[in-house]
Amino acid sequence: MQSFEYYTPTKVIFGKEKENEIGKVIKGYGASRVFIVYGGGSVKKSGLLERVEEALKKENIVFEEFGGVKPNPRLSHAREGVKKAIEFKADFILAVGGGSVIDTSKAIAHGSANPDFDIWDIWVKEKPLVKTNKFGVILTISAAGSEMSNSAVLTNEEIGMKQGLSTDLNRPLFAIMNPELTYTLPKYQLTNGIVDIYMHTLDRYFTHTKGNKMTDGIAEALMRNVLESGKIAYEDQTNYEAMSELMWCGSLSHNGLTGLGAETDFAPHRLGHSLSAKFDVSHGASISTVWDSWANYVYKKGPERFVQYANNVFGIEGIDEDTIKKGIESTVAFFKSIEMPTCFSELGIGVQDEESLKDITKRCFYKPNTLVGKFLPLDEEKIYDIYTAANK
Ligand code: NZQ
Ligand code: ZN
């Protein structure tokens, strides 16, 4: 086990109707001017936003709405939010939505606490982030895990890059999680979320760190749970137990717990981000699209880890290459069973030409002369080969 620090300060308030407590919760943090961030309108349609605002009014909390966050949230929109939050003199940023809304809220919290900085300078670490505004979350989709994570991802549409920022200042003060709020999800968002939850642990799981039994056990249990609950939820997304399991797995899968004490990889995530940056495709789908090709490309670098994965997550017996292949195939079969793509044409972007593959490859590199991932560190040539294998 490697040395590690574990810091997850987010207070989790989990269960039915918990969103109705939002007024009291925010008052507990001493805030009185709340800037509410939301997306394209699902929270208006469901009546959630109205209930949140009623709860704030009851506690005499003033608020302003800021909607319009799009999936793969844009830098320019976050900048607009920063400006408005500063004008409103917000002392609390409240995200009501999913990963895109939460990440935009994180950007607005950082930007409004540092009015002299442009948020992209914070993202590319040209400006040091040492303080932020208070912010919290009411979660409406189990997926990104941003409600407890230390990261936030924005797309800079001027340069066509999708990039994450990792810092403990990205940890929300609280996350209100009512699984019933996810009943209204379009099926495609539900399944994207299932893949993302699974991948947050799988992208940590493929590591060369040995003897990390506690963390491995947590990771494997989480993945088995997502496989089981994901299938039930896919059939019936009003199944409270399955939706609860997914919601809690979503948070634990990306708050750091499932990779503690190990070096983590995250290459499939980066390869997916590049597809989202170019084609604006959904996050979960972007990763299931490349995972099969990635796994087949890298498994020889650590076959025993792939064997352990097949044994402990899928119950496949054996220690040979056939076992590894079955583990990979079972993962791909799971993605397919919930109608998630496993190659470019299934993702809906079609087969790409050489020029396009080179372009997608380049977008994986935030800085020149760096490598992507740790399990098998990937240079441009290797990434190009992995994309080529998925290009069908
Ligand atoms: O915008 P609205 O109308 O709300 O609709 C959203 C959106 O279209 C809809 N939705 C959400 N909750 C709903 C609902 N529709 C009906 N009923 C509900 N209860 O779902 C769509 C997708 O929303 P989004 O917030 O984009 O989903 P998700 O949570 O998957 O977030 C994806 C974003 O998070 C980033 C991804 O890259 C992507 O940009 N990630 C953030 C991470 C982090 N901060 O830790 C880690 C992840 O790896 C990921 O990169
Ligand atoms: Zn993700």
Image (cartoon, helix red, strand yellow):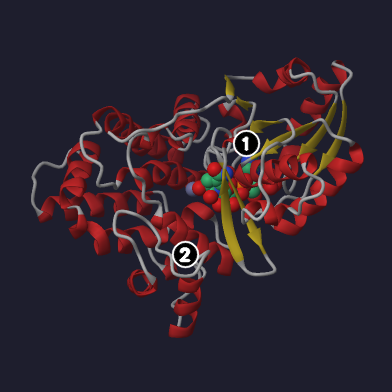
Q: In this figure, which residue is indicated by the disc labeled 2?
A: 347
Q: Position of residue 221 (x, y in %)?
A: 31, 30
Above-or-below relation of 371 to 359: above
Q: Which of marks 2 and 1 is in front?
A: 1
Image position of 118 (left or right of 378): right
> In which image quadrant can residue 11 be found?
top right
Residue at coordinates 48% horizontally, 52% vertically from top-left?
284
Of residues 242 and 94, which is closer to you in this image?
A: 94
- Upstream in the sequence, badge 2 or badge 1? 1
Image position of 238 (left or right of 52): left
Q: How many marks?
A: 2
Q: Are circles 2 and 1 on residues that touch, CB within 8 Å?
A: no
Tag 1: residue type? Leu
> In which image quadrant can residue 322 be found?
bottom left
Above-or-below relation of 101 to 16: below
Q: Mark 2 and mark 1: span between their CA atoms?
A: 34 Å
Q: Where is residue 392 in the image (x, y as percent from the top left)?
A: 37, 74
The answer to whether residue 392 is visible is no
Q: What element carries label 2?
A: helix
Residue at coordinates 78% horizontally, 26% vertically from top-left?
51
Q: In this figure, which residue is indicated by the disc labeled 1?
A: 169
Of residues 120 and 286, which is closer to you in this image?
A: 120
Residue density around tag 1, few if under 14, some if 14–19, many if 20 or more, within 10 Å: some
Above-or-below relation of 254 to 27: below
